[in-house]
Image (tube, coloured by chain):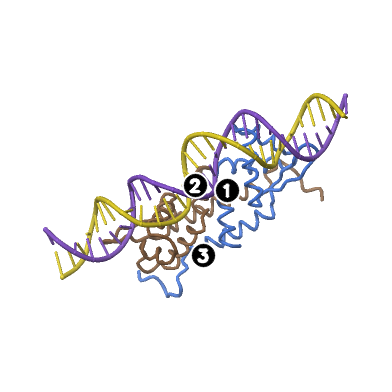
Chain colours: A brown, B blue, C purple, D yellow
Amino acid sequence: MQDDDIANIMRALGHPVRLNILRFLASQQQRECCCGDVTESLPLAQSTVSQHIKVLLDAGLIERKPHGTRNRYMIRHDRLAEIGTAFGGLLDGLNFQAPHKEAEPA
Amino acid sequence: MQDDDIANIMRALGHPVRLNILRFLASQQQRECCCGDVTESLPLAQSTVSQHIKVLLDAGLIERKPHGTRNRYMIRHDRLAEIGTAFGGLLDGLNFQAPHKEAEPA
DNA sequence: CATGTTCATCGCAATTCACCGATTAATTCG
DNA sequence: CGAATTAATCGGTGAATTGCGATGAACATG
């Protein structure tokens, strides 16, 4: 995964409301879960929630499925796994990327 | 770790330049590594780099050590570990947080 | 076909972000 | 003490983000 992709995803995750939306979707995975449900669970206007949902969609974190008049949203677990791997790789790369050394002096 | 904290950290990581800075610091861990070094490695003005460094500092991802006229910067590996744990927890929570169910119908 | 529901999208305001050049504070050294 | 170096901070500009209410498209239903 590219730096830009990772940065995009991190930015999408970089807002408490969006974390809440993700968690709400995770907790409702089985039922219908449309924009209105999410809106009800938050002290925000419907248009605002829709915007946040769009950010999550663009980052590939969730998926939209039209279903009659409403849209059903669900978490993209495949992407979540990818992101976990990429993030782990990032952190690994950040831990002692020293060219070649024996061990720490003390 | 609080949602707001996580969001802050994610936002700090949500910019390619800041990812580059972190990687640069990781690769230079042993030598002196001051703002000027970072600036040289990027096509950005010194003031801009200093701003990005401030964001990383505020998020607790790096550490500053005054050293004569210059400042030495280094990655906070302790925080990195914490963040890895928190992020892992987040992703775990997002994977099937279903209240209590037997199994999927199909 | 008219009505109601759901929700994405369109302005719009306020705030924050990213970037820059210029300035200033701290420090070393002649 | 004066000159040089380093880097944080200030002030400014343009773009993006966050929030809102209003509008409009898509669809179900009477």
Mark 3 or mark 1: which is in front? 1
Q: Badge 2 sits on which subunit?
A: A
Q: Residue at x 45, y 70 (%)?
A: B98
Q: Nearer the viewer, residue B29 or A55?
A: A55
Q: Is residue B41 left or right of residue C2?
A: right
**SS category of the residue bearing label 3:** helix
- Type of amino acid at the residue the image marks with label 1: Leu
* Residue that carries the numbered disc 2 in the rendered image: A8
* Residue that carries the numbered disc 1 in the rendered image: B13
Q: Position of residue B28 (x, y in %)?
A: 70, 40
Q: Are dots 2 and 1 on a single chain? A: no
Q: Nearer the viewer, residue D22 or A100?
A: D22
Q: Is residue B31 visible?
A: no
Q: Position of residue B54 (x, y in %)?
A: 65, 45
- State the quadrant of the C terminus of chain B: bottom left
Q: Residue at x 44, y 64 (%)?
A: A43
* Residue that carries the numbered disc 3 in the rendered image: B93
**SS category of the residue bearing label 1:** helix
Q: Is residue B25 left or right of residue C25?
A: left
